[in-house]
Image (spheres, rainbow, N blue to C red):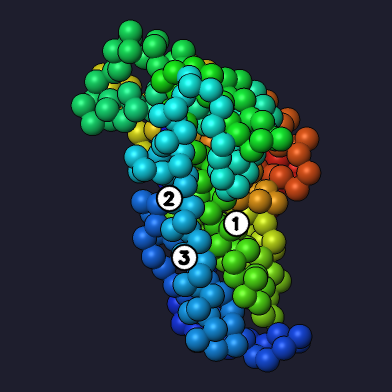
Amino acid sequence: MRLKTLLISLLLAPAIVAGADSAGPPLSRFEYARLKMGTTFRIVLYASNQAEARQAADQAFSRIDDLEAILSHYRPDSEISRLSASSGQGERPVGVDLYRVLSASVRLARLTDGAFDFTVGPVVLLWRESRRTHKMPDDGALDRARKLVGYRNVEIRTDKHSVNLKKKGMQLDLSGVAKGYSAEQALLVLRSRGITRALVDAGGDIVVSDPPPGREGWRVAVEKPGPDTGPVRPILLINSAIATSGGTYQYSEIQGKRYSHIVNPKTGVGSTVPASATVIAPDGMTADALATALCVMPPEEGLKLVESLPGVSALITIETPDGLERYRSSGFPP
């Protein structure tokens, strides 16, 4: 289960700011925000005039709408919901976007040894009810749901662009990658319109292209986890993505014990160790999925994985009775 904690904020001036691009006319800053996929998508871009900026932003938001109709498991008519409903009935052809996202999700699930698993839907439904009732899921129901979880039960045929969900009752949940992918696609739409300096914030999942005029990069700040919140040093990003996940704000308290909204796919239980992870990666889906996985992996194991991936860095924070423990990969900004 991947519900964003919104631990990422932008340090950007709210007004239109004039800039200069050596390759063309002067650029101005424009910002647009709309509700999509259950969160606020924000687009910040630099363009030569307002008409150009608005048309590009409108097309980017339209692309996000199209992806929501494909990737949202909350919509019973979405492509992903229809695929889940066909589980156990053999392979089904899928569209280009769903094929891309599922292929990447399988790769990321293998990479994390199942710490990120997009088949966790049946378990997530139980914990969603537990958050409402403040009661633990029924043991029998949890056991049955857990048996339906496992990315190895997803077979993807590259020659046919088809997918086979091997077990009847499987339910896919792409909330761990859908926003990252959608932000990436919105950025591509802007680039196709000639907008090369832009940022897309998908409710805390952020992707950026070239930096604003006259700047070294996009200034992004990550909020401190735990009770000791306060000002933080901004991170400069260029042509990359950043995502933060954790149970600091979204959790359930059941019988005096705190369970994170992030469910460990291997146990079927919400994590009881307060943890958060911020990941910088070359693309939105990788940052999105790894931020989730690092919250349930042992921190040393998570850092070892991060160090093995080109262009990826991370900061993991664990809340303990003695205070915060931080684990930072070698490439993460100090």
- Extreme residue in the bottom direction: 25
Tell me where residue 320 appears, x and y as whole percent. Answer: 48, 28
Asked if 107 appears above or below 149 in the picture, the reply is below
Q: Nearer the viewer, mark 3 or mark 2?
A: 2
Asked if 10 appears above or below 230 in the picture, the reply is below
Cα gap from disc 3 to disc 2, whole angstroms: 13 Å
Q: Which mark is residue 184?
A: 1
Asked if 288 appears above or below 218 in the picture, the reply is above
Give amino acid for label 1.
Answer: Glu
- Which residue occupies 23% across, 31% down? 132
Find disc 2 in the rendering and name its residue: 69
Q: Which mark is residue 61?
A: 3
| Residue at disc 1, secondary structure | helix
Tell me where residue 76 appears, x and y as whole percent. Answer: 34, 40
- Which residue occupies 33% across, 9% down? 139
Q: Is residue 301 visible?
A: yes
| Residue at disc 3, secondary structure | helix
Quarter where residue 104 is shown: top right
- Which residue occupies 70% across, 35% down? 158
Tell me where residue 73 appears, x and y as whole percent. Answer: 40, 39
